[in-house]
Image: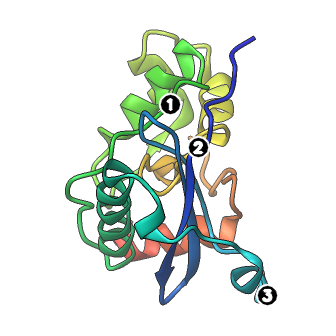
Amino acid sequence: MKSKPVILATCTIQTPRGVFAAHYSAAGLVRLDFPCGVGAARRLSSQRLDAISRSVRRWHKQAGRAVARILQGRLPGELPPLDLATGTPFQRKVWAALRQIPAGQTESYGRLAAALGAPKAARAVGSACGANPVPLLIPCHRVVPAGGGLGGFSVGLHWKRRLLAIEGA
């Protein structure tokens, strides 16, 4: 079993749509938590940026800019390094493929599985999307069922609808 990365810093990203929490290891951004609940922002503790390493401060600025740009319907620009070590090789392969789906477009779980050389792995693609630790920066919201509908989204269908609408999909 893989060991989880050691979180060195947790920093908040304030947006008009709520407060995101970015968690960093020595290798990069490990996880991005979406806003939840009205009081959650008050309970979320963020480390002072001057108390963490320069690299994490730089990564956090990149993450903050990327989140803001995506929520404005723009391309994210430069991303911080992503620490995806907790993913299986198949999950990391799916996550890489997700980053190739252009903004404003969607792909089906089955077509994505076929493109990865595993045409019978649509459910495994869905599971990899659900395990995506940075669902805004690795756009799993762009994957939908072939028969129509939205499918699932780890942070709620209201966010999936919102993100697809922002992108004009």
Q: Nearer the viewer, residue 70 or 124?
A: 70
Q: Which residue is mark 1?
A: 84
Which disc, if any, is residue 133? 2
Q: Which residue is mark 3?
A: 39
Quadrant of the rendered image containing residue 21: bottom right
Q: Residue 157 at what x, y percent from top left?
A: 68, 65
- Taking the spot 60% from the left edge, 17% from the top edge, the residue there is 88
Q: Residue at x 59, y 43 (%)?
A: 133
Q: Is residue 48 above or below residue 97?
A: below
Quadrant containing the C terminus in the rendered view: bottom left
Q: Amino acid at mark 2?
A: Pro
Of the two numbered discs 3 and 2 in the rendering, the one whose residue sits closer to the viewer: 3
The first of marks 1 and 2 along the sequence is 1
Q: Residue furthest front?
A: 51
Q: Badge 1: few (under 14), some or many (20 or more) residues near its Cα, within 10 Å?
A: many
Q: Nearer the viewer, residue 129 or 55?
A: 55
Q: Specify few, some or many for label 2: CA neighbours under 10 Å numbering under 14, 14-19, or 20 or more.
A: many
Q: Quadrant of residue 35?
A: bottom right
Q: Residue type at mark 1?
A: Leu
Q: Nearer the viewer, residue 119 or 80?
A: 80
* Residue 126, image x, y percentages: 64, 34
Please say if 158 is above or below 119: below
Return the x and y of residue 95 as percentages of the image width and height: 46, 32
Q: Is mark 3 in CB contact (under 8 Å) with mark 2?
A: no
For the residues labelled 1 and 3, say whether their Cβ atoms are less than 8 Å apart. Answer: no
